[in-house]
Amino acid sequence: MEYFAANPKPGDLDRHSTLARTFIEQHVENKRRVALVTSGGTTVPLENQTVRFIDNFSAGTRGATSAEYFLENGYAVIFLHRQFSLLPYSRHYSHSTNCFLDYMTGTEDGPVVVQNDYQQQMANVLRRYRKAKKENTLLLLPFVTVNEYLWNLRELAMLMHPLGANALFYLAAAVSDFFVPAERMVEHKIQSGEEFAQPNGDVPTEEEQRGRKPAAHMDGKSLVIDLDPVPKFLKLLVDGWAPQAMIISFKLETDPSLLASKAKGALKKYAHHLVIGNLLNTRKWEVVFVTADGGEKWIRVPANRRAKSVTGRTDDGRSGTKDRTEPAMEIESLIVPEVASLHSHMIEHGDPRYLNG
Ligand code: 9Z3
């Protein structure tokens, strides 16, 4: 595809490829299902020597949490994630309002141990983390830019071919729809001071001489950014890179009235297996599954089991936890078994896209 001829291969792609090949071979051999879970936001650099970039919203919670539940459900997981976003298992202690040292106790000379209050929960996380390490069922591969994400996705999809229908794509990363193509990227930091601003129009810049207008330039005191659309990679993944795998994408919206129709539109356009729709403000306790047969099924965490936010309010704004009778439930504990069961059905009965017709 033209995109890959025009945009540079990431420096660590070959290393990722070697790691993934060995990992996949092991799981092909033991007939384990492998989920490629993508997670976190992609960046769009504005300069080659990048000082400024555009980012996409995502903490990586959906991806990291789902990865743990895939492992619990017997999958091996390739976790393609935004560098420094949440990771399976360590997510319970990183990025929280507590510093990890707040979980510790001990005298100045040691020994330092985990506080009593956290012992049980940490032992449980540690047991699951060690199991994944021992069985080599979790491979962590980082990306930063949308270009790195696309190169890695294509490479991994090709490497996963030998898995056949045992491969599952769970695309939770928040991928930018727009980017700066390499041929229109300026080399140096864009200057905001007018006396150093790069010329706009009068004198052709290096990028203009190469045929295309630079994607970012100063116009007086304003910075003007002109982005290209990211190619429709989902189409390529479904039709070309992973034709035998089960493919699940997420659709993020903020306007509730658009969610179901946008999810249905994506499914129609790309003809994959499932779109999971979610709204920015309610994503932690409700999602909608949209399937090719026109099905629309909401999955919800019961109101008394929604996580309490750090401000002491539940995430939906209700105060306190008075009606909480059970510990908080993660919605991924409902999503992933449902996905795994659709996957089992496809493995046992054939791809629903090619049946009935
Ligand atoms: C999602 O919708 C994810 O569920 C979230 C998770 C990004 C909302 P957090 O990481 O958030 O838990 O904070 N991801 C997919 C969004 C997306 O970019 N979809 C694209 C599209 O619909 C590409 S498949 O076109």
Image (cartoon, rainbow, N blue to C red):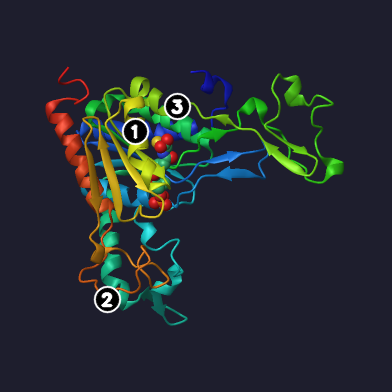
* Mark 1 or 3, nearer chain start: 1
Name the mark nearer the viewer: 1 or 2: 2
Q: Helix, strand or loop at disc 2?
A: loop
Kindly identify the amino acid type of the residue bearing the numbered disc 1. Answer: Thr
- Ligand 1 occupies quarter: top left
Q: Nearer the viewer, mark 1 or mark 3?
A: 3
Coordinates of residue 171 in the picture (x, y in percent) = 36, 38
Give the tally of numbered discs: 3
Occupied quadrant, residue 324: bottom left
Report whether the residue tagged 2 is closer than 8 Å to ligand 1.
no
- Residue 282 at x, y = what percent? 36, 54
Q: The residue tagged with tag 3: helix, strand or loop?
A: loop
Q: Which residue is mark 2?
A: 322
Determine crowd level at label 2: few under 14, some 14-19, many 20+ residues with C-alpha closer than 10 A: few
Q: Amino acid at mark 2?
A: Lys
Q: Residue at x 20, y 46 (%)?
A: 337
Quadrant of the rendered structure where residue 246 is?
top left
Residue displayed at 40% across by 74% down: 104
Label whose residue precedes the other's in the sequence (2 or 3): 3
Residue position for label 3: 232
Instruction: Say which residue label 1 marks.
Output: 22
Residue sitting at 19 percent across and 33 percent down?
A: 31
Residue sitting nearer the eye, 23 or 164 = 164
Q: The residue under label 3 is which amino acid type?
A: Lys
On screen, residue 39 versus residue 218, left or right, reads left
Instruction: Confirm whether residue 79 shows in the render.
Output: no
Q: Residue 27: image x %, image y %?
A: 25, 35
Picture layout, residue 161 above or below residue 299 = above
Of residues 230 and 119, the one drawn nearer to the viewer in this rendering: 230
Q: What residue is shown at x 42% (from left), y 32% (from top)?
A: 153
